[in-house]
Amino acid sequence: MAPAWVEELHLHHVTIPVTIDKMYSVMPSTPIPVKQGESLYLSNLDDMIGARVFTPTVYFYQSENIDPSKKPITKILRYALGDVLVPYYPLSGRLRETKNGKLQVFFGPKQGALMVEARSDIALVELGDLTAPNPSWEPLIFKFPNEEQYKVLDMPLVIAQVTLFRCGGFSIGLRLCHCICDGLGAMQFLGAWAATARTGTLVIDPKPCWDREMFRPRDPPMVTFPHMEFMRIEEGSNLTMTLWQTKPVQKCYRIKREFQNCVKTLAQPFDAAGCTTFDAMAALIWRSWVKALDVRPLDYHLRLTFSVNARQKLKNPPLREGFYGNVVCVACTTSTVSDLVHGQLPKTTRLVREARQSVSEEYLRSTVDYVELDRPRQLEFGGKLTITQWTRFSIYKCADFGWGRPLYAGPIDLTPTPQVCVFLPEGEADCSGSMIVCICLPDSASHKFTQALLLDSMFT
C-alpha cells in the first residue's frame, strides 16, 4: 500500500446535465483606444504553436457564501467582465492570420468576450472530491457545436460559462486564449476581474501593459541555440502508440511535502551544484512514466520539455510591470530510454536542471528569431513528455469574486493531450505544501507508475 506521502486520488465519474439558458456578448463597458479595423502586434512568444490553444479552467463556489439579496451571480460577473475589458481591451478582439501565418489581434465587426449562463439539476456534493481535476467536469466548459480542436482564429478570446447548481453553488468554466497571456498573465487578468466583481468598482493592480513589440525579432534574426524543443523527431519508439491507441486515463496523485523533500535529497546531482524541488520531481515523474509505459527500444532518445518563466531574466530592457503576455521559453532535455529507466536519478535530475538553467535572455531572443525563420506548424508529440507547473500560480487567491476562494481552481481534462503532465497546488485551505500531480496512463500501467514513483518501493 502506498504510504501517506503519496496518495492516488480516485476520480468520481459523474454525468453532469447542463442546460444553457442565455448567451451574452460582453463588450468593454466604456470606449477603448482602438478603432474597428485596427490590429495589435503579437510576439513570436505569443504565436508559438504551443500557445495556439485555449486554456480551460474551472472554479467551484459553495452556496454558503452567496447572499441571495444581491444581484444575480451572472449579472455581477458579466458587468465586472465588461469593466475589466476596458484596460484589458485586447481580450475583446479576435485573432487572425497575416502573411507567413503570423497571428495578430484584430478589431472588426465581431468583438467582445462570450459569457454563457447555464444550470444543472445536481448539487455540488454529487460531483465527489473537488481536490483534483476530473474529465467528467467537461460540460462546465462551453464549446461551440462542432468546434475544431485547437481553433483560435475568429474566436472570442475569453469564454466564460457560469453554471448554477441545484444546491445554490455555482462554477465558472473559463477558456482564455494562451496567445494573449501566459499563466502569470492569466492570473493577473483573473485577479482584476475577480477584484472588480468583489468590490463593484474597477480594480487593476498592476495596470496592464501590452508592449508586445519589445519581443520583435532581431534584424537579421540570429538563432544561437539548437532549440531541440521545436525539432521534428520521428517517433521511433512505442511510446506514442501506447498512449494514443489504448485510450489513456487521467491519474492524479497527492504528493506530500515530506515526499518532495525526500526526493530532492535523493536526487541531488553528483556535482554538488544542487537542484530545485521541481528538478527532482520532474526527473522522477519522467523516469516513472517511461518505466510504466515499458518504452522500447532502449537506445531511443526521449525528450522532456517544460516551460520556464523568463521574466526575471530580462535586463535589456527589463519587462515593464503589468505585462501579461507570454514570457515563457520551452526548456528541453533528452535521454535514452535505457539511461532513464536503468540510470541513477541524480543524473536525470542534472539534465532537468541544466535545461532549466539554459533559459536566459539570449535564449529567449534566440527563440523569437527561430520562430521568425521557421514557424512550427503543428504540435510535436514524438517521444516526448511535457510538464506544466502551476504550483507557483496564486490561482485560489486570484479567483475570489466575492463569494470566497473557490473549493477547486484549475484544469479539467488532460486526456486530449496525454503526453502532458501538470503539477498543481493543493487547495488554498491546505498549507502543508502538498501538490497534485496529474498524468495520463493506460489503466494497465497505473500500478507500475505508482511503484516507480515510490522509488521502487523504497518507502514501503
Image (spheres, rainbow, N blue to C red):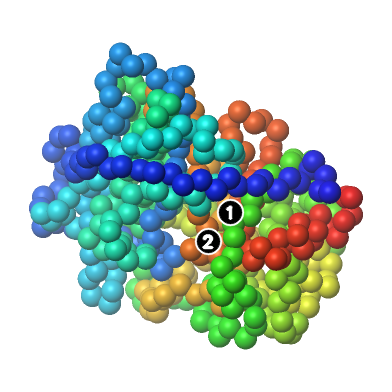
Q: Is residue 386 visible?
A: no
Q: Quadrant of residue 170?
A: top left
Taking the image as drawn, is residue 59 in sight? Answer: yes
Give the percent coordinates (x, y) of residue 96: 23, 64
**Residues tagged 2 and 1 counted as in contact (Cβ below 8 A):** no
In the rendered structure, find residue 422 and report the number of the disc placed on it.
1
x and y percent of residue 328 in the render? 49, 57
Which residue in the structure is indicated by mark 2? 415
Q: Residue at x 59, y 65 (%)?
A: 248
Q: Is residue 37 above or below residue 432?
A: below
Taking the image as shown, residue 422 lies to the left or right of residue 89, namely right
What residue type is disc 2 on? Answer: Thr
Side (left or right) of 31 relative to 281: left
Which residue sits at x=34%, y=62%?
43
Q: Which structural element holds mark 2? A: loop
Measuring from the top left, give residue 395's x and y in whole percent: 50, 38
Q: CA distance from mark 2 to mark 1?
A: 12 Å
Q: Residue at x 28, y 56 (%)?
A: 144
**Where 437 sits versus 397, above or below?**
below
The answer to which image quadrant residue 368 occupies is bottom left
